[in-house]
């Protein structure tokens, strides 16, 4: 009996020791993971100063580790990503922006990056249009949602006249997600739309407004006004956009949509898109459909 108890005690003690060793190894591995991610990226960056610049697939391999790395370890590496944005070489800036984009897509991306909003906002002030777009993209990708602290940087970006218009259009849509009732956002949107914009940018803006499913009457009026645009592509895009807008917004637009349907000079495809927007909200009977000519 004594021998059995002694063996049992030794066995239990061995388990306790083994668990302690495993915990220690896990802590060491965690620390190494954080250091490894940071050092790997820094090593990649420093190679730009060597005779043989690193290849893109090397950066991809480093980034592949971010989704499965512990939050604390990723947090330790983020300052090195931000530091890359201060380097003169745009290739290094792009590498840093890419790593921040991968971090943003983690489920805790917003929590990890909120302390670094100023770092991300710095991208919006750079002359390279790719880096501006990356800055907007990082904010947009943040999960579960971008922080309200990003609003100031995005408003300042939207009101500038020397920036990438398409990236600004995406910033506009993002602002409507995080601060739809902010009066400064409303003013910034109006100022941006007062500029001469390309067809592609205008379509992006109008679709961006619709995709937020905003119920703000001011932004709904922007879409309603576009139903009378001279460009048929704009009219078609907006008529389709109302198909995914909230019913309150479609009710606001109902007279304009009905006028479009009854206009004999309007294209049939555009009329059908307007009719579908009303139908989806129970504002028109299916029997009133007009077949395409």
Image (spheres, rainbow, N blue to C red):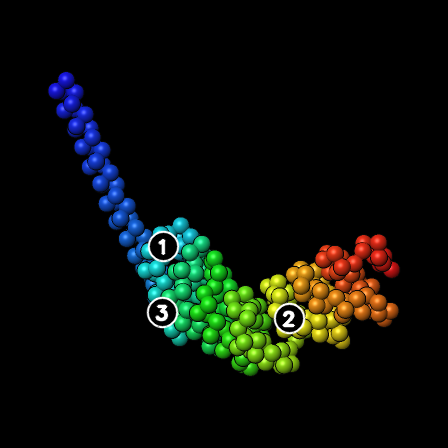
Quadrant including the C terminus: bottom right
Return the residue at label 1: 71
The mark that comes first in sequence, 3 or 2, is 3
**Left or right: 6 in relation to 52:** left
Furthest residue toward left: 2
Residue 288 vs residue 138, the one in the foreground: 288
Q: Nearer the viewer, mark 3 or mark 1?
A: 1
Residue 242 position in % (x across, y down): 70, 63
Q: Nearer the viewer, mark 3 or mark 2?
A: 2
Q: Is residue 11 above or below residue 273?
A: above
Residue 168 in view here: yes
Residue at image position (26%, 48%) is 27
Residue 98 in view here: no
Which quadrant would residue 19 be assigned to in this image?
top left
Q: Which mark is residue 217?
A: 2
Q: Secondary structure at mark 2?
A: helix
Q: Nearer the viewer, mark 2 or mark 1?
A: 2
Q: Which mark is residue 83?
A: 3
Q: Are marks 3 and 1 in contact (CB under 8 Å)?
A: no
Q: Secondary structure at mark 1?
A: helix
């Amino acid at each position: 009996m004594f021998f059995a108890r002694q063996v049992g005690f030794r066995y239990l003690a061995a388990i306790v020791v083994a668990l302690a060793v495993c915990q220690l190894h896990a802590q060491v591995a965690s620390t190494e993971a954080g250091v490894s991610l940071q050092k790997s990226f820094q090593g990649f960056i420093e190679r730009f100063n060597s005779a043989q610049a690193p290849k893109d697939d090397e950066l991809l391999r480093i980034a592949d580790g971010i989704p499965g790395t512990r939050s604390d370890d990723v947090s330790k590496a983020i300052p090195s990503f931000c530091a890359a944005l201060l380097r003169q070489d745009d290739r290094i800036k792009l590498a840093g922006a890419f790593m921040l984009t991968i971090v943003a897509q983690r489920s805790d991306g917003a929590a990890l990056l909120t302390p670094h909003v100023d770092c991300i906002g710095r991208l919006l002030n750079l002359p390279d249009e790719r880096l501006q777009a990356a800055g907007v993209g990082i904010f947009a990708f943040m999960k579960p949602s971008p922080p309200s602290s990003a609003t100031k940087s995005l408003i300042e970006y939207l009101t500038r006249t020397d920036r990438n218009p398409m990236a600004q259009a995406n910033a506009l849509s993002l602002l409507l997600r995080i601060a739809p009732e902010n009066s400064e956002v409303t003013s910034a949107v109006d100022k941006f739309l007062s500029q001469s914009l390309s067809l592609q940018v205008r379509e992006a803006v109008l679709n961006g407004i619709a995709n937020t499913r905003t119920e703000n009457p001011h932004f709904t009026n922007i879409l309603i006004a576009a139903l009378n645009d001279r460009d048929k592509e704009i009219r078609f895009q907006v008529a389709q956009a109302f198909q995914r807008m909230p019913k309150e917004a479609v009710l606001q637009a109902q007279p304009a949509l009905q006028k479009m349907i009854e206009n004999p000079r309007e294209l049939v495809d555009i009329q059908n898109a307007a009719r579908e927007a009303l139908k989806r909200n129970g504002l028109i009977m299916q029997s009133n459909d007009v077949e395409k000519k």
